[in-house]
Amino acid sequence: MRTSNLITDGAPAPVAAVSYLPPPPAQLSRPSALFLDMDGVLAPLAETPDAVVPHPERTAALRGVAERLSGRVAIISGRTIAEIDRIAEASAASASGVHGLERRAADGSLHRVEAAPAVRDVVAAFEAFARTRPGVIVEDKAVSAGLHYRGAPSEAAAVVALAERLAGETGLILQAGNLVVELKTPGASKGTALTAFMQEAPFAGAVPVMLGDDLTDEDGFRAAETLGGFGVLVGPLRETAARYGLPDVAAVLAWLNAVEETA
């Protein structure tokens, strides 16, 4: 496991553990496949999920690099595929939503894990919790339920405690993100989504490169490494399975443009 000058709780890491991640090469030596998270990677983090909107520079970068890589580009996000298409303006034929629980292959076929019945109970519990806490937002994704507290960071301890209790009671998977917790149907991850894509055209035989920003992307980093590729951590440095790093969304878009020019 690679380390950096920050660890997950924000405390400085020991000097001996510091390892600054280099930027990924723009010129890739073999045919490559790109797997990109949405929030914090292709789009800046926002106060609410709906606040992230399409942007012409993002759309142009995605379309350009997908054309140069013969369609070997997929967005793998915690958002639903419908939300991915809204924000990316349907510029990615291949997409996986809700942390791997739904996936659209390049040929347009859809694959979804059946929702665990307990998700409905969690949505109700989250809505009851949010009702008396301004700034806390519930996101119902059918196969999972998210509780966002970016607008109420003081509620962090209560949000996490609620999610941990419900995970224990329901058997759903607790997925922690950036000022959000999510309880999801078991059975998939960003890593399983990446692996599935790599078994299909046009991705099969390429070198997988996964770009992500938070702990939900670590499964994708590990899957890419296992399949002969690598991960790219976007944002603040921390302990990670990624081999390379980029500082922010602007750097990601610049790198995608460079890949398009050199592919």
Image: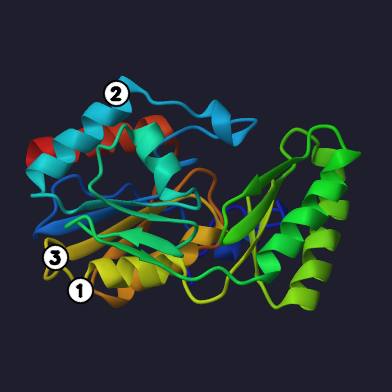
| Residue 192 coordinates in the image, percent (x, y) | 39, 72
The amino acid on which the numbered mark 1 sits, given as a three-letter code, is Gln
Can you give x and y, in whole percent of width and height, for residue 187 in the image?
Answer: 50, 77
User: Seen in the image, is 62 located left or right of residue 120?
Assistant: left
Per the model, the C-alpha gap separating discs 3 and 2 is 26 Å
Per the image, label 2 sits on a secondary structure element best described as: helix
The relative height of residue 24 versus residue 3 in the rendered view (above or below) is above
Q: Which residue is mark 2?
A: 57
User: Residue 199: which numbered mark, if any?
Assistant: 1
Question: Which is more N-terminal, label 3 or label 1?
Answer: 1
Among the two numbered marks 3 and 2 on one chain, the one whose residue lies closer to the N terminus: 2
- Residue 129 horizontal/vertical position (percent): 86, 49
Q: CB under 8 Å between callouts 1 and 3?
A: no
Q: Residue 234's x, y, as percent?
A: 44, 46
- Check disc 3 and report the residue beneath it: 206
Disc 1 versus disc 2: nearer the observer: 1
Task: Assess disc 1: are there few (<14), some (14-19) or many (≥20) residues with their C-alpha within 10 Å of its C-alpha.
Answer: few
> Residue most toward the right?
132
Q: Measuring 66% from the left and 72% from the top, which residue is drawn there?
A: 172
Say if residue 246 shows up in the picture.
no
Occupied quadrant, residue 96: bottom left
Task: Give above or below for 197 relative to 148.
Answer: below
Amino acid type indicated by mark 3: Ala
Q: Secondary structure at mark 1?
A: loop
Query: Residue at (23%, 73%) from the top-left corner?
Result: 228
- Left or right: 140 as drawn, with respect to 191: right
Give the tally of numbered discs.
3
Quarter of the image for residue 65 reads: top left
Q: How is the image coloured?
A: rainbow
